[in-house]
Amino acid sequence: MRQDDPFAITVVYLGPDQRPGLPEEHPEFGLPLFRHEYEQLHAQCERAVARREKSYPDLVAARRLEAQDADRDLAAWRELAAEWLWICTGTGELPSDATLANRIAAVELAADRLEAELERGRRTEANLYQHHLLEALHWHLRPGRQTRFYADLNRTLRAEMRAQSERKAA
């Protein structure tokens, strides 16, 4: 079958977030807006690391943040950035599953801080965008999400499709 055939059969695997009848599809449960924007989620993690590397030393020196809390939060965001780099590109090292609780806590802390900003009336476009990204990051960290598995599966399938088209072209 030719790749440019408009009638080619395409099989689409419905992941757990796309299967009909899940509670998340109920109107009370909204799916995160940017849940499939992997590059944006990775960029959010990288920006979070950069902000923390810049601001935490001053906050610790001013005794507005405990050093161990700053270290734990920064380490968790570095792990999130590494995880999303792997999800997006397949490069780098995945963080251990043992650090999942710290990564979840870091995203929840960031969401709480942002919620406080929004409640103070700082409803800027940038804050709302970040809010949606944090919701998506938190959603991907939930038990059963299997984001890593699907990212790896997609890379494998794309590589097989490329190899198959190269064989056909030869």
Image (spheres, grey):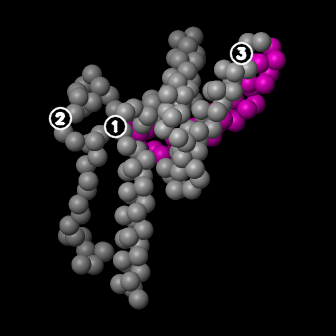
Q: For mark 2, what is the residue?
A: 21
Numbered mark located on residue 88 in the image:
none
| Magenta stretch in the rendered image | 33-62
Q: Residue at x 53, y 33 (%)?
A: 99
Disc 3 marks which amino acid? Leu
Figure quadrant of residue 152: bottom left
Residue 121 appears anywhere in the view: no
Q: Is residue 56 left or right of residue 152?
A: right
Give the Cα separation between the discs numbered 3 and 1.
33 Å
Of the pair 140 and 133, the residue shown nearer to us: 140
Q: Is residue 44 magenta?
A: yes
Of the pair 93 and 161, the residue shown nearer to us: 93
Q: Residue at x 52, y 56 (%)?
A: 90
Q: Are marks 2 and 3 in contact (CB under 8 Å)?
A: no
- Outermost front residue: 98
Indicate the secondary structure of the residue bearing disc 3: loop
Q: Is residue 119 magenta?
A: no
Q: Residue at x 34, y 37 (%)?
A: 144
Q: For mark 1, what is the residue?
A: 144
Disc 1 marks which amino acid? Gly
Q: For mark 3, what is the residue?
A: 65
Indicate the secondary structure of the residue bearing disc 1: loop
* Vertical side of 79 occupied by 126: above or below: above
Give the Cα separation between the discs numbered 2 and 1.
16 Å
Figure quadrant of residue 31: top left
Residue 37 appears anywhere in the view: yes
Q: Residue at x 74, y 24 (%)?
A: 56
